[in-house]
Image: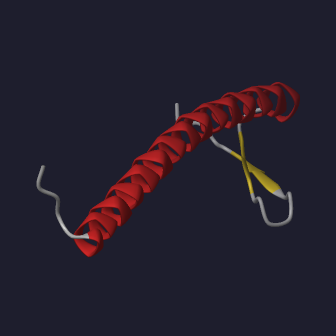
Amino acid sequence: MSKITKEELKDLQEQQGKLNAIKHDIGLLSTQIHSLNHMYADEISKQAESKKSLEEKYGKINIDLKDGSYEEIKEEK
């Protein structure tokens, strides 16, 4: 049976190892993206609940997130 050189085999094995590591990292990143998307959706939901609660307490307002001050939103009739 014929064989490639040890150096050629070593190169191929290193390349395959790098490919496997990259595939592994892609899998981890995909899982992290999925988790972050869920976390983002949860925060959007929490923010909507907070806005609803604040609107019930203060009416329709614009809040300055820097200092907490707010202005009433004047509705046009």
Front in this rendered view, residue 77 or 66: 66
Residue at the far front in the pictured view: 1
Coordinates of residue 55 in the picture (x, y in percent): 77, 31
75 versus 12 height, above or below: above
Q: Tell me: residue 45, above or below residue 24.
A: above
Q: Is residue 65 left or right of residue 77?
A: right
Location of residue 35 in the rendering, given as x and y in whole percent from the top left corner:
61, 35
Residue drawn 33% across and 56% down?
16
Residue occupying the far bottom of the picture? 7
Whole-percent x, y for residue 19 in the image: 35, 55
Say which of 62 and 53 sits in front: 53
Q: Nearer the viewer, residue 45 or 65?
A: 45
> Residue shown at 60%/41% (left/top)?
36
Taking the image as shown, residue 74 lies to the left or right of residue 13, namely right
**Residue in view at x 48 percent, y 46 percent:** 24
Q: Where 36 falls versus 2 (above or below)? A: above
Position in image of residue 29 (x %, y %):
51, 47
The reply, left or right, for residue 25 in relation to residue 73 is left
Q: Quadrant of residue 17?
A: bottom left
Above or below 59: residue 13: below
Name the colour scheme.
secondary structure
